[in-house]
C-alpha cells in the first residue's frame, strides 16, 4: 500500500523539524557519548512516532512548530530503547548500520541510552517555553513517565518469555501492549494533551493508539520472518535466533506435528542455527498458517482502533484523516 | 568522626519513610524485574541523598512527609545509576551483596535500571498530589533531568579516562562534578525548590552541594584504596583494577619514579592483577603522598561548600546545622 502525496509531504516536514530539534538537544561533550547517542538517529528510521504526536496535536489545533518538541521527546525516547534492546538482544545491525554497542562498546552504549532517556524529558520540558500551561506540561511528563515504566515491563516480559516453554497468545498481547503499544499510546496522548484535548477524547485516542500499536508489532513480527533483508535494515530471522515468542511462533508451535515442532525448536533461541535451519523453521511456521492468523489478528486490532479514532471530536478533521491513513499504512507496511 | 544523636535519629526517620515510599512505587510485575530493581535498595546503603533532599526542604519549612517523595526520587535515581555502573565496571559486589547483573543477568539488569529511571520521575510527580504548585513541580522535574543528563556525561568521561594515558586533575574534577556532584546538587536543589526557596538561596545551595559532592567523591576514591573491606561492602582496589583515574592515581603517577610508575601501571586497568600486585600499587600511591594531597583537596572543597551554606537565609536554622554536620561527616567518613 502507498501513502498519499499529502501525508508523504507532511511526514517529510515533521521528520525534518523533529530531526532539527533532536540534534539541537542531543549535542555536547564528551564527543564519543554524543556520537554514540545520535548514531541511530542519524541513520534515520521511519519517524513514525513523531508523526503520531504531531498529527494528534494538529487534530486539536496545535502547530507542528510547538508539538515537534513533544515529537522529539518521543523519538529520542524510542531511540534510547533501541540502543538498550540491541545490547540485550546482541543485535549487530539496525537501520542498515552497525548497532551502537558494536561501534562504541557495551559500556558506552548503556550510557548513551541513559543520556537519551534524560534528553527525552528535556525535549518535553521545552513545551513550557511556548506558553503551554504548566498543568499540560506536567500531564505530558506524567504520560512519558508512564510509558517509560511500562515499556521496561514489556521489555522484561519479552526477555523472560524467551526462556519459557509455553506462552499464550493473551500473554503475548499483554507483552506487546507494554513493549510497543504503550509508546504509541503516549505519543498520541502527549500530542493531544499538549494541544488541550478534552478527557473524553483522550480516552478514545488511547484506545485508538493501543490497538494500532499492537497491530504494528504483529506486523513487525511478520516482517522479521518474511521481509526482504535489504529493506529490513537488519538480519532476517533474528527474532527466531533470539528465541522471541512472536505471535507467529506461538501459533505455529500450538499446531505443529512432532516433526514440524522439531524443525522450529531446532532454530528457536539457538544462536548457532544455520541460515538453512532458520529458513526451514520460518517456512514451517508459514506453512502452518501463522501469517493468515497474525494478519487477521492485526486487522481486528486495526479496525477497533480506527473505530475509536472516528468517535473523537477534533477541530481539524483533515489531521484525523491523515492519522487514519497512517494507521492503515504502518500496520500493512512491507518494510 | 561520629554523628550527633540528633542527626542520627533524624536520618533514621528519613531513611525509613523514604524506603516506604520507594517500595510502594517500585512494585509490580513481572516479579523478576521488580526484584532486580529493588535488590540494591533492599540491601540498604547510606541513604545520604534522601537526607540532603529532606534537610534542604526542611530549611525552608517543608515537612519530610512531603519532601520524602522527592527524596525517594533521588534515591531511586541513584540506584538506577548503580545498577548500570556495576554492569559497565563488571563489579560483582555492592553493599555486601552480589550486584544485580550477577544475580539476574546483564539484560534484565539493564531493564531494571531503566525502570528505576522512570520510577524516579514517578516519585517526583507525587509532589503534585500535595498541593505544591505545578511551577515548582516542573522546576523539580527540570532539575532531575539536568542531573540525569549530566551524570551520564560524567559516567562517560570516567569510562573514557580509563583508556587514556594522561588525565589532568582539572579534568578529574570536571568528571566528578558531573558523575557525583551533579546529583548532590540536584538533591539539595529539588528539596529547596519543593519548599519554595528563593532563587538567591538556590544559587548558594548549588555552590554548597557541588563542593560537598566533589569532596565526597574524593573521599570515596580514598576509601577504595585504604578502607576496611568488610565495611566497604565491595572488594578493595576495584578502582585500580578497572583503571579508574582517581585523583590519588593521577597525583601519584605525576610524581612517581620510573620504578614506582611501573609498580602502579602493573595493576592499573589490569583485570588479571593479583592481590599482592594491587596492594603493592596501593602502597606506592600512598607512599607518594597521594592521601595527604587528596585530603587537603577535599578539605578545600568542604570549606568552600560550608561557607556557601552559611550565606543562605533559611527559616529553619537547625536544619541548616544538621546539613552542615552531615556535610562534614560524609566527606570525612571511614566507610
Image: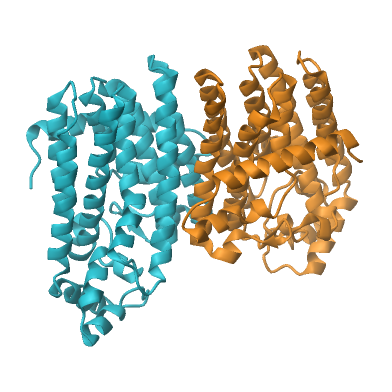
Chain colours: A orange, B cyan
Q: Can the viewer see residue A172?
A: no
Residue farthest along the bottom direction in this orientation: B259
Q: In percent of the image, x 66 and y 16: which residue is there?
A: A197
Quadrant of the rendered structure where residue B193 is?
top left
* Residue B53, x across and y down, in percent: 28, 32
* Residue A285, x across and y down, in percent: 83, 52
Q: Can the viewer see residue B142?
A: yes
* Residue B135, x across and y down, in percent: 43, 21
Q: Along the horizontal axis of the image, is A75 left or right of A260?
A: left
Q: Along the horizontal axis of the image, is A320 left or right of B308?
A: right
Q: In percent of the image, x 84 and y 25: which residue is there?
A: A321
Quadrant of the rendered structure where residue B287 is?
bottom left
Q: How many marks?
A: 0
Q: Nearer the viewer, residue A129 or B16?
A: A129
Q: In the picture shown, does residue A157 fall above or below B263?
A: above
Q: In percent of the image, x 61 and y 44: which residue is there?
A: A22
Q: Nearer the viewer, residue B51 or A272?
A: B51
Q: In the picture shown, does residue B84 fall above or below A126?
A: below
* Residue B175, x across and y down, in percent: 35, 56
Q: In percent of the image, x 49 and y 33: which residue is there?
A: B28
Amino acid at each position: 500500500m502507498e501513502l498519499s502525496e499529502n501525508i508523504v509531504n507532511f511526514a517529510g516536514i515533521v521528520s525534518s523539524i523533529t530531526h532539527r530539534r533532536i540534534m539541537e538537544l542531543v549535542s555536547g561533550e564528551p564527543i564519543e557519548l554524543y556520537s554514540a547517542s545520535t548514531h541511530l538517529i542519524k541513520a534515520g528510521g521511519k519517524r513514525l512516532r513523531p508523526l503520531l504526536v504531531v498529527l494528534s496535536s494538529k487534530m486539536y489545533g496545535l502547530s507542528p512548530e510547538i508539538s515537534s518538541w513533544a515529537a522529539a521527546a518521543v523519538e529520542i525516547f524510542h531511540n534510547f530503547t533501541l540502543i538498550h534492546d540491541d545490547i540485550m538482544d546482541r543485535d549487530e545491525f539496525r537501520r542498515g548500520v552497525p548497532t551502537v554497542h558494536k561501534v562504541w562498546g557495551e559500556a558506552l552504549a548503556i550510557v548513551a541510552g541513559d543520556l537519551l532517556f534524560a534528553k527525552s524529558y528535556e525535549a518535553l520540558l521545552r513545551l513550557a517555553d511556548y506558553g503551554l500551561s504548566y498543568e499540560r506540561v506536567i500531564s505530558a511528563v506524567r504520560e512519558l513517565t508512564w510509558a517509560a515504566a511500562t515499556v521496561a515491563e514489556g521489555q522484561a516480559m519479552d526477555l523472560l518469555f524467551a526462556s519459557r516453554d509455553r506462552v499464550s497468545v493473551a500473554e503475548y498481547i499483554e507483552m506487546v501492549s507494554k513493549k510497543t503499544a504503550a509508546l504509541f499510546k503516549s505519543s498520541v496522548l502527549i500530542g493531544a494533551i499538549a494541544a488541550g484535548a478534552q478527557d473524553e477524547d483522550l480516552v478514545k485516542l488511547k484506545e485508538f493508539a493501543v490497538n494500532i500499536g499492537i497491530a504494528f508489532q504483529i506486523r513487525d513480527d511478520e516482517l522479521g520472518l518474511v521481509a526482504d533483508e535489504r529493506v529490513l535494515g537488519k538480519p532476517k530471522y533474528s527474532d527466531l535466533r533470539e528465541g522471541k515468542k512472536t505471535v507467529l511462533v506461538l501459533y505455529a508451535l500450538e499446531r505443529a506435528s512432532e516433526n514440524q515442532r522439531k524443525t522450529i525448536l531446532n532454530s528457536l533461541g539457538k544462536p548457532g542455527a544455520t541460515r538453512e535451519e532458520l529458513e526451514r523453521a520460518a517456512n514451517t511456521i508459514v506453512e502452518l498458517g501463522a501469517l493468515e492468523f497474525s494478519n487477521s489478528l492485526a486487522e481486528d486490532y486495526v479496525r477497533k482502533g480506527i473505530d475509536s479514532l472516528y468517535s473523537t471530536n477534533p477541530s481539524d478533521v483533515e489531521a484525523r484523516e491523515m492519522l487514519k491513513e497512517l494507521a492503515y499504512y504502518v500496520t500493512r507496511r512491507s518494510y
